Image (spheres, helix red, strand yellow):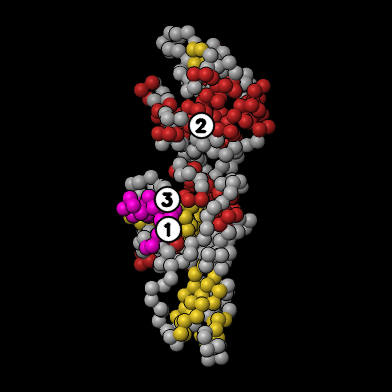
Amino acid sequence: MTLSDYPMNHAAEVSRERFVAILAENDSPAVAEGAAMYDTLVASGVSVLVFLGFYHVESRMGKVGVCKDYDTKNPGNVRTPASLSLSASLTPEIPGKGRYAMYPTWTFGTLDWCKRIKGPKYAESGLLTVRQVLPKYAPSSDRNDPDSYARTVLAMVERWGGKVGIDIIKDLTPHNTSGPRGHKARAVVWHVAEGGRAGVRSWFHSPASEASTHYLVCKDGDVIQFVDEAITPWANGAVNKPRLTNPVVKEMVESGINLNRLTISIETERYTGDRLTADSPMGRALAQLTREVMQRHGIPIDDDHVLGHNEVDSVNRPNCPGNLDWAGLLAAVKGGGGTVSKEPVVPAKPDTIPEAGTAEWFLNARGETVVVVNFGGKAAHIEGVALMDAGVTVANVSGDRYYRSVIDGTFTEWLKVGG
Ligand SMILES: [Zn+2]
């Protein structure tokens, strides 16, 4: 698989030792400073492999061109420093080429390059990936070929990093989308599939379902993609009593734009009551996919930008994304660190009592399954029942017990025990 694009900002893909070894393999004059350069990149949040890719294209890592001839210690061959305090001087005017920044050490040159990539010219202008940055960094008007530059950097990132990014099984649906998103993705929404992988695949491929999400993360950690990230799926339905205390939700709702156009939706292969933890294959894959999606789209990686479906619709989807370990999963999305402030959604009370003979379930604020059972017109709240376990029985207020079983991933009617 060839990388089509890659974020400029990324957690370190390789160790410090490997980074220094790559400089050594390329006979770079910067090898003695390799460890300090690596630490500088990591502290800045800039991808160490993307840096090496640029450095290689610019000067074969310091071995050719202006960088070598003038000993500029300027890994990105930049003309003007982002921070004047880091650059001692400029080269003299080079015939036909102009002047370039010169740095006292490679580490200073690296830090200044990071400031440039993170600053107003690139990241702060929304240029966050290799393919977004290069047309400005190496414009064709300056006799560069940004496309070939990007392909070279991406190939190097892939080669040095080994496997980069999570494996994705493509199963794109021709149905159930409404075209290009037309807006920048602002958040990720997690869902619970209430079914197995085969059921979800056939559902999303059926025109009758009028439903789809970008991804399904499976129990075994497989990731299936149904809708390209640039396309709008039919995932979130209408907004109904959204969680406006989340500033990201509030901003999206107030924009008046359909939330399917503003979010990347990820389904998980489980039922509402199946607790999803960060140390399971599905939890690890969900966290990694979510992080990669957020990096690709420049979405801030924090609690507010990872939503449960119930933060968008607390009325009709109070149970989605079901019972999950928010703290553990969000810590994993963020790369293992930081504190997590996200509280589970407290479901809105139903406006109407459901029809006799029905039951509804949702999660309470502690993440426990709460069941509202309405048998014969009498409602009862039963807390902490793992209702999704087939065969579990619940009692109504008269003491009669009822159960449901699961056939092909679908619950049967409520059946009275012994009835
Ligand atoms: Zn959902």
Q: Which mark is residue 247?
A: 3
Taking the spot 54% from the left edge, 29% from the top edge, the residue there is: 51
Can residue 333 be seen in this snapshot?
Answer: yes
Number of the front mark, 1 or 2: 1
Left or right of residue 183, residue 272 in this image:
right
Number of the front mark, 3 or 2: 3
**How far apart in space, not on screen, are marks 1 and 2 (Cα)?**
41 Å
For disc 2, the neighbor class at 10 Å (few under 14, some 14 to 19, many from 20) is many
Q: Which residues are magenta?
A: 240-265
**Amino acid at dot 1:** Arg
Is-magenta flag for residue 241? yes
- Element assignment for label 3: helix
Is-magenta flag for residue 172? no
Identify the residue position indicated by label 2 in the image. Answer: 153
Identify the residue position indicated by label 1 in the image. Answer: 243
Taking the spot 45% from the left edge, 80% from the top edge, the residue there is: 358
Residue nearest the viewer, comparing 371 with 229: 371
Q: Position of residue 43 (x, y in %)?
A: 58, 33
**Amino acid at dot 2:** Val
In the depicted structure, whether residue 149 falls above or below residue 210? above
Residue nearest the viewer, comparing 418 with 310: 310
Q: Residue furthest left?
A: 256
1 or 2: tag closer to the N-terminus: 2
Left or right of residue 43, residue 251 in this image:
left
Q: Position of residue 58 (x, y in %)?
A: 51, 22
Residue nearest the viewer, comparing 118 with 348: 348
For disc 1, the neighbor class at 10 Å (few under 14, some 14 to 19, many from 20) is many
Left or right of residue 253, residue 200 in this image:
right
Q: Residue furthest bottom?
A: 419
Q: Position of residue 155 (x, y in %)?
A: 52, 34
